[in-house]
Amino acid sequence: MKAALDRALIERLTQPGPRLSGLENWLLNEVWSQDAFAASGNSPKDYLRRGEVLVNERENALRSSASSLFAELTAPPSAERTVASFFGRNQKSAVVILDGCSLREMPRLIALAKDSRRAVLESGCSRAAVPSETEYFISERLGLGLPKDIGPSQLTGRGELKQRNIRFYYFGQTSDHHTIRDGDESMLLWSRFPDQRYTDSTATDESMFDGIWDGLEQAWKRTVQAVPPDRKVLVTSDHGYIFLGPGLSDPGLKDVDRALEGKRYRFFGPTEQLPKAGDGLWVDPAMRLAVIAGRGHNRIQGPGAQSVYRHGALTLMEMLTPWIVLGPVN
């Protein structure tokens, strides 16, 4: 694997113009690739640590030298990279959303597709909402006309889905089972795995990634493999996550979360003063929203306070999400 940074690369990355597509290629084809996993001895936790060292180094350099990256991350994805557009192009298809799944897991997902005898027709990146939370993804990124402030468990029976001839299945646990019948409808399946793991007491170091790697197989069997075999399937995610193990954050962002009350983002009331944008904060005055911009290690309270797996801010690994289109079973 190439080094995260060298002089020629720094000069190219800091030139004016868009840079996100190049970063996506780097992440998918080098950092989080099957070759990178093999080079880590096929050890999920070693693969996670090696990749995060590279991402941390490059992203920290970009925050200080090319902050326009965050404008690219907050822009809506291509119109073709929404669940609604996929359904529109593929009648009687299925979409599987693995809640909180990131680009790191792409090699695992592609291997599972191969084991399921489904060809990978397309693989790339989509985008989380801002902030990178599930509820905002549902209203802003699905493209299905759903309202704000509802979670995936509340999508069952929604009229907006029935009007589009979409049947919904929710998997709150990886062990949940649904009998998925065929029919004329499209299908939307939502699994809470791996997001449900991030507040576990075990989510304090890279070893939990071994469990995520293994758990994806069970989640896959309950969702993708349960879809009727003649359908195309889109596998995607609502958001990724940042891994904040020792040495994997930006020291320049220490205490950047003070204005956010220790959170990774915060909405401000109409009479509150918004913090100043810059220095590790992205601010949207219209939404009255401030978000950590970069790999800041915030000091949260309550559930998940000890977890090093977090989301809600603007980083490559929280905002860029998998987009894998699979063909029918061969």
Image (tube, rainbow, N blue to C red):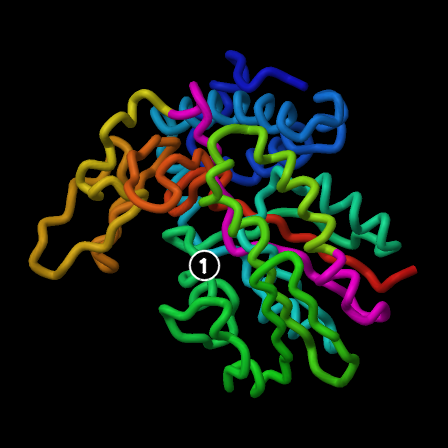
Q: Position of residue 144 (x, y in %)?
A: 52, 74
Q: Residue at x 85, y 68 (%)?
A: 229
Quadrant of res 40:
top right
Eyeballing the image, is 8 above or below 152?
A: above
Q: Position of residue 68 (x, y in %)?
A: 37, 37
Taking depth in this image into account, of 168 and 301 the one nearest to the observer is 301
How dense is the environment of label 1, judged by Cα within 10 Å: few (below 14), some, or many (20 and up)? many
Q: Quadrant of the C terminus?
A: bottom right
Q: Quadrant of the N terminus?
A: top right
Q: Residue at x 64, y 56 (%)?
A: 174
Q: Residue at x 69, y 77 (%)?
A: 186
Taking depth in this image into account, of 205 and 131 the one nearest to the observer is 205
Taking depth in this image into account, of 55 and 112 the one nearest to the observer is 112
Magenta highlight range: 221-249
Q: Is residue 255 left or right of residue 3?
A: left
Residue that label 1 marks: 134
Eyeballing the image, is 61 above or below 143?
A: above
Residue found at the far front of this picture: 201
Label 1 sits on what residue type?
Thr
Q: Is residue 322 magenta?
A: no
